[in-house]
Image (spheres, grey):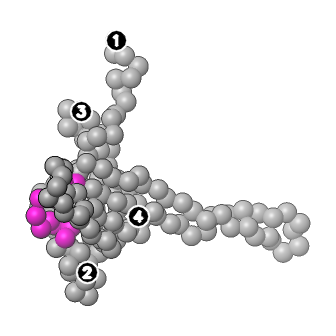
Amino acid sequence: MGRPTDSYLGAANFRIFIEGVNDPIDGFIKMSGLKATTDKMDFKHGMDRAVRQGAGRHDYEDIVLERVYSGASEFYLWRKRIEAGHLDFRTMTIEFLDNAMNSKARWVLGECWPFTWEMDELDSGVSKMTIERITIAYEMWIPG
């Protein structure tokens, strides 16, 4: 019989698929959490004395992806298309992997676009990798 912790997944392994890019993108060292919220709406029916509650607008928090910079990336090129005035919204899939690199969960995000692309400062006096940081906006979670 396995240990009770055998079914837990570490937070280290994931890869990204972007609509229009043939291969999955990996090598990420960090991704901010996914967060979806719905506004709580108060309302009343006619002369009803009770205040009711219902669901309002949905909002999805931006995600930040980080990986070691290795030259012009798919995200950088995608961002340049946005800067050039193209409405280039794409579907993006985040695949969560176990330690054996088997897919355990998928999150599909719709209407994604990179609104920030940045690279760490360059400093010849230190020994460290330069990090590429991409902030992605999205408008919906699609069942995946």
Mark 3 and mark 2 lie on one chain; the one further toward the N terminus is 2
Which mark, by number, is residue 62?
4
**Picture residue at 85% right of the left edge, 63% below the top:** 50
Inter-mark Cα distance, 3 to 1: 19 Å
Amino acid type shown at disc 2: Ile
**Picture residue at 27% right of the left edge, 69% below the top:** 117
Mark 1 and mark 4 lie on one chain; the one further toward the N terminus is 1
Q: Quadrant of the rendered structure where residue 63 is?
A: bottom left
Inter-mark Cα distance, 1 to 4: 41 Å
Amino acid type shown at disc 3: Asn
Amino acid type shown at disc 4: Asp
Which residue is label 3 attached to? 99
Residue 89, position as x, y percentages in the image = 29, 75
Task: Decide if residue 22 is on the left or right side of residue 53.
Answer: left
Looking at the image, the residue that sits furthest to the bottom is 85
**Picture residue at 34% right of the left edge, 15% below the top:** 2
Of circles 2 and 1, which is in front?
Answer: 2
Which residue is label 1 attached to? 1
Which residue is label 2 attached to? 82
Mark 3 and mark 1 lie on one chain; the one further toward the N terminus is 1
Task: Decide if residue 4 is on the left or right side of residue 67.
Answer: right
Q: Which residues are magenta?
A: 67-76
**Picture residue at 34% right of the left edge, 34% below the top:** 9
Of circles 1 and 4, which is in front?
Answer: 4
